[in-house]
Amino acid sequence: MSDPIAEDLISAYVDDELDAPTRAAVERAIDDTPALAGVLLEVVEAREAVRLLPMVDLPNDALRAVMAHVAAADPIAEAAAPTTTAPSAQTAASSPVDEVARSRRRRVRAQRWLAGAAAAVILLVVLVATPQPRQVTPTVGRLVDNHAARVSDDTDPTSQLATLAAAAPMALFR
Amino acid sequence: MRIRVGLCCVGAAALAVTAVLAFGTVGVGASTGSDAAEQLLDGTRQAVTSHDFDGVMVVEWSDRGGRIQRTTVPVTNDDGRLRIQGLQTHMGAGPSEIVMGDQHALVMWTQAEDAAVPSASKKYRLTVQDGPAVAGRTTTLVEARAAGAQRTSARFFVDRETGILLRSQQFGADGRLVRSVSFMQISEPVAAPAPKATAPPSSSYAARATRTVAKPFRAPARAGTGYALVGRYQMPNGTVQLFYSDGLFDVSLFQQKGHLDWGGLPAGGTDAKVAGRTARRYVIPGGVALVWDARGVVYTCVTDAPSADLAAFVSAFPTDSGSGWGDAVDVVLAPFSW
């Protein structure tokens, strides 16, 4: 995509916005210039990707799976899990030093939960924005032709073309 | 079936023609070595481009049920244009010379090769001997047997006078005929004028050589049992073709981004397991076409290689594993691991 003019022309070509002479000129240029053919491919793929942006239905357990990953990766959260037991009198009467340490742990825990939440948000964005892989149906008959043509390019062509001619009535080639 | 073993320059072509002439004048008699076999096979394309002829060919192949199918096709080779029914190829001089037209509207334009075609004698034992008459013409028989194999893999019957390939046969591991392409009639070949160099024609389906193959596609330099990457090509629709050869048989592997729409595939195929992959398999007169997908890439493999070779070849490419959803979670959360 180094030439913005070429890119614009190719985009217009893909959108069928060119007049006939310009369109023909662009087609000739694409045929003659592999780099332009590459630009065409990129433009077509980009359009296709946008077109295929999905309406995403997340799996029922998507959020639970994310949070499970976050929890599994947070040792403090795990350590805090057995807080169902009542605090002891000794804990209640802790020193100012203990209080500072607890405060620090709370801050760290909050920061880590924030990071986890950020990860969850990023994951959801990725899931929504990533286009679904497109469905492909190879034109098998044509690819068989391509193979035979390539083989024929440097070997005896009669036997290759004869097998293609014999294959022509098959469903593969209709 | 490839019968060229590295022809890439005028010198090699001249050597091959010289070999044909030598065999033509003195005969062969007892078996001779692989060099002579390779020279004979190398010369078959040159022989077609340098002679005009008409003929009728018979194509036989073993279908998916193991039954032998048979059909005949008329052939005309006139002034560098080889026509077989609705197909034609224009054989010009130089490295880029295939045009197939009419109903198939296909253009194949090769500009460069990754590597030389491997020598067939690295994998096969090649022998040369006097062959039987084919379509009324005297032949030299080249026989190929894979190293360690008990049976012949392929036979080539080369016209002793012109070097034209008159018959090729391929056999399975059990010795049964898998494929045969043979002239049943051929006119007396007449020397043709030297072919002219041709320019790439304009086509919406031209496959062009490419130096790079971007992810998610893969292009290993070698795959399976001695198959070397000889060429890489890209079509305007993004399909990448990798072309491999072991010196005798060829494999094209086409790769497309996406997931396979199984329901959209043409009729006539059967489901098959090949090297652990679920695939749709089509038996065609020229070999086999195999379609499957893995990790967001749809693969179509077209080859005349034996089935054992095909399975080993397919193993060189990815298979599906793991869960996409789990992978996505892992990827996103990885930076937040602590």
Image (cartoon, grey):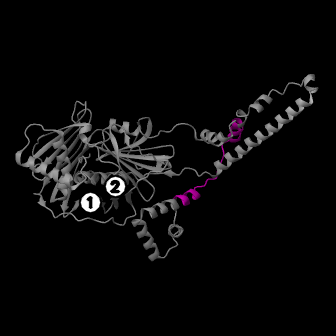
- Residue placed under numbered mark 1 in the picture: B94
x and y percent of residue A75 in the render?
A: 74, 31
Using the image, determine if residue A147 lies above or below residue A72: below
Q: Position of residue B127 (x, y in %)?
A: 16, 38
Which residue lies at the image location 37% right of the left edge and 52% below the top edge?
A: A143
For the record, the magenta segment spans A45-69
Q: Chain of mark 1?
A: B
**Is residue A121 magenta-colored?**
no
Left or right, A138 with respect to A76, comes to: left
Tell me if residue A50 comes above or below residue A92 in the rendering.
below
Magenta span dominant secondary structure:
helix
Q: Secondary structure at mark 1?
A: loop
Q: Earlier in the sequence, mark 2 or mark 1?
A: 1
Residue A164 appears in the rendering: yes
Quarter of the figure that contains the C terminus of chain B: top right
Badge 1 density bin: few <14, some 14–19, many ≥20, Cα 10 Å: some
Q: Tag 2, which chain?
A: B
Q: Quadrant of residue B173?
A: top left
Mark 2 vs mark 1: tell me if same chain.
yes
Residue drawn at point x = 8 percent, y = 48 percent:
B24
The amino acid marked with disc number 2 is Ala
Q: Nearer the viewer, residue B112 or B218?
A: B112
Q: Nearer the viewer, residue B333 or B101?
A: B333
Q: Position of residue A45 (x, y in %)?
A: 52, 58
Residue lying farthest to the front in this orientation: A97
Residue at horizontal 61%, vertical 38%? B326
Q: Which residue is mark 2?
A: B112
Q: Disc 1 residue type?
A: Gly
